[in-house]
Amino acid sequence: MDLIAILFIQNNISITYARDLIFIAYVGHLVELLWEFNSCVKSRYKYFSPTEKEGLLIVKMTFWETIIYFLTDNTYISSMHIFLIGYMGSGKSYWANKLAAYYGIPFMDIDDEITTQEALSISEIFNTKGEAYFRKLEHTILQQIISTKEEKIIACGGGTPCFYNNMKNMKSAGITIWLNIPTNILLQRLQLEQAKRPLLQDIDDIKVFIEKQLQKREMYYKQADIIINNTNISIEEFVKTIQHV
């Protein structure tokens, strides 16, 4: 996983292509080992006992079975994704859209997928069905996205990494990037959007609320593969920042 991430980030190539390079190299190495094994055995075959010959045949078949498995197993040939995580107002959807255009990879927003499926806004879901229902639905949709065969740039909800085993699943399925935005900037942005944010409705002191939630959530955010501390940059600078991590 780490090697695929390095190939993708440092060489600006598709995640699928990076994964396939490693896949081809691995299968090629198995074929090379099988060739060497055959050459070694062929020159000495007549000296082996029947029991030894049977054992050699088993080894040879195991090589072939392993090669065929990697060539045909669809669970191995699966796509990787890039997940942008961070607190609400950190710019996940904005940067996911930018990165998707830069790399030529489809973009998805988990909150948008939820509202489309429910035909309700996030606030309406929280108000009518509750946060527990929302988090379960969020987890289900995340799993659906992860299982798709085409890599994507995915903007997660602010709380997505903090519930169920979402963070572990995201890290297993691709690269996670935390947009670590200072509290004062988050406060400025969210004060303008308080009415649209279900968790901020009826909150008198938004700053205190943000600080308390960040204390709870940072343990999940910090598990990200890459941390971006400055998003007041161009897309080229954003990509370069990733490359230097």
Image (cartoon, rainbow, N blue to C red):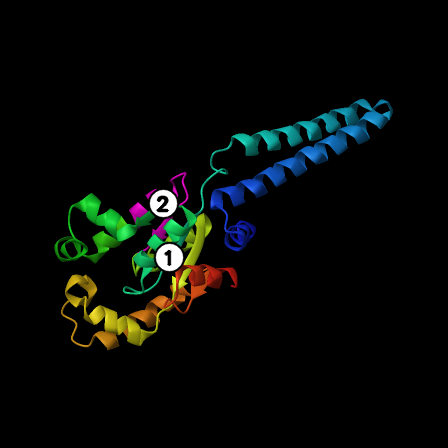
Query: Looking at the image, is 183 positioned above or below residue 86?
Result: below
Amino acid carrying label 1: it is Leu
Which stretch appears magenta? 139-156
Residue 82, position as x, y percentages in the image:
41, 52
Q: Nearer the viewer, mark 1 or mark 2?
A: 2
Magenta includes 142? yes
Residue 202, position as x, y percentages in the image:
13, 69
Amino acid carrying label 2: it is Pro
Circle on res. 55: none
Residue at the limit of the structure toward the right, as seen here: 47
Q: Residue 59: tell me if it is visible.
A: yes
Q: Are marks 1 and 2 in contact (CB under 8 Å)?
A: no
The residue at the point 81 percent across, 31 percent down is: 40
Q: Which residue is mark 1?
A: 84
Crowdedness of circle 1 by 10 Å Cα count: few (<14), some, many (20+)? many
Crowdedness of circle 2 by 10 Å Cα count: few (<14), some, many (20+)? some
Foreground residue among 157 and 136: 157
The residue at the point 44 percent across, 48 percent down is: 173
Q: Quadrant location of residue 127?
A: bottom left
Q: Is residue 84 left or right of residue 74?
A: left
Residue 224, position as x, y percentages in the image:
44, 61
Q: Which residue is mark 2?
A: 106
Q: Is residue 89 left or right of residue 122?
A: right
